[in-house]
Image (spheres, coloured by chain):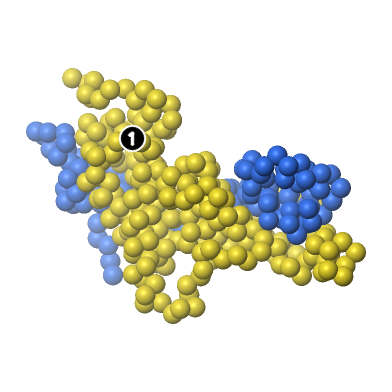
Chain colours: A yellow, B blue
Amino acid sequence: MSESTLVPAGGLLAEADPDAGLLARLRCGDEAAFLELVRRYGPVMHRLALSYVRSPAVAEEVVQDAWIGVLGSLERFEGRSSLRTWLLRILANRARTRGAREARCLPFSALARDGDDAPAVEPDRFQGPDGRFPGGWAAFPTPWDSVPEERLLARETLAEVDAAIRQLPPRQQEVIVLRDVEGWSAEEVCDALALSPANQRVLLHRARSRVRASLERYMEAA
Amino acid sequence: MTCQELVELVTDYFDGALDAATRAEFDAHLAVCPGCVTYLEQMRTTIRLTHDGARGGPPRPEPGRRRASSPSRSCRSPSGARTWWTASRWSTCCAPSGRRG
């Protein structure tokens, strides 16, 4: 008997979930399907775990722990969300718990505020109330289109982006990694991280704005 | 809408989350403000580099991935397909081993 006959074809789920085929195989106990799942989502899970804990080794433990949780509850997965948002939800919960435990041992200054309301652009870049155009640019930002593509994509530039992301508060990192690095939709990210759409956009906006500011400093220093 | 207000709405703008009136103001502002056009371009470039950077940037250690995805001996028991994924069994045959420190 072939495994596919044991589980009904995914129907709607097959369209919505890129992993629907894997899920059917996982439910049949197909070990290769599990390894494929680890291959697909291990890296992003590790990356997300790193936004909450500081060392790669601890992040790895969190990921392992999450996989064990996944294996233990796979039979209860009802397919109301996509498989990957469910995976990420399990990972995020464990990473937050572990991160909170770690945070109690860190100096207070190491705890960045997630819901910070820092502006996207420093206020002194805009004209004050006495300017000709209050709230208008004091000096226009310098376009990057004169920067050659090779320099934009140079290792150093990308390393700058990466460093900027790693300095973001954890919740901002989670959102920018899923939205902009992994290319997930806003809906999926809200689902995986239990965020309201508005909150998701605020976190993403703070994250992108800070990465842009880092890139701007980097471009101007060159 | 001032430039200082516009820069706070860029993500909402990209996500199509602005109401029609605000979006119209946003577009009208862009039509007359080269500084904000540049800013919007910089945000687009930032998003593109965030995507490319994480994939093409310096390799990061991902020990879990390398070891877990490397071919391992089969965990499947001869008698039943479902037994392999019991957590203890998985961690003994598929999980990274030999973690130090």
| Residue B11 visible (yes or no) | yes
The percent position of residue B55, horizontal first and vertical second, equals 53, 48
Residue type at mark 1: give it.
Answer: Gly
The percent position of residue A163, horizontal first and vertical second, equals 56, 63
| Residue A60 visible (yes or no) | no
Query: Which residue is depicted at the point 86% across and 47% down?
Result: B32
Q: Is residue A155 above or below residue A8?
A: below
Q: Is residue A90 above or below residue A25?
A: below
The percent position of residue A44, horizontal first and vertical second, equals 43, 50
Residue A104 in which image quadrant: bottom left
Q: Residues within 10 Å of mark 1 (few under 14, many from 20)?
A: few
Query: Which residue is depicted at the point 38% across and 34% down?
Result: A19
Q: Which residue is mark 1?
A: A79
| Of residues B65 and A161, the one drawn nearer to the viewer in this rendering | A161
Left or right relative to B101: residue A155: right
| Of residues B100 and A12, the one drawn nearer to the viewer in this rendering | A12
Give the structural element (helix, strand or loop) at label 1.
Answer: loop
Q: Is residue A201 above or below residue A9?
A: below
The percent position of residue A215, horizontal first and vertical second, equals 67, 60
Left or right relative to A220: residue A114: left
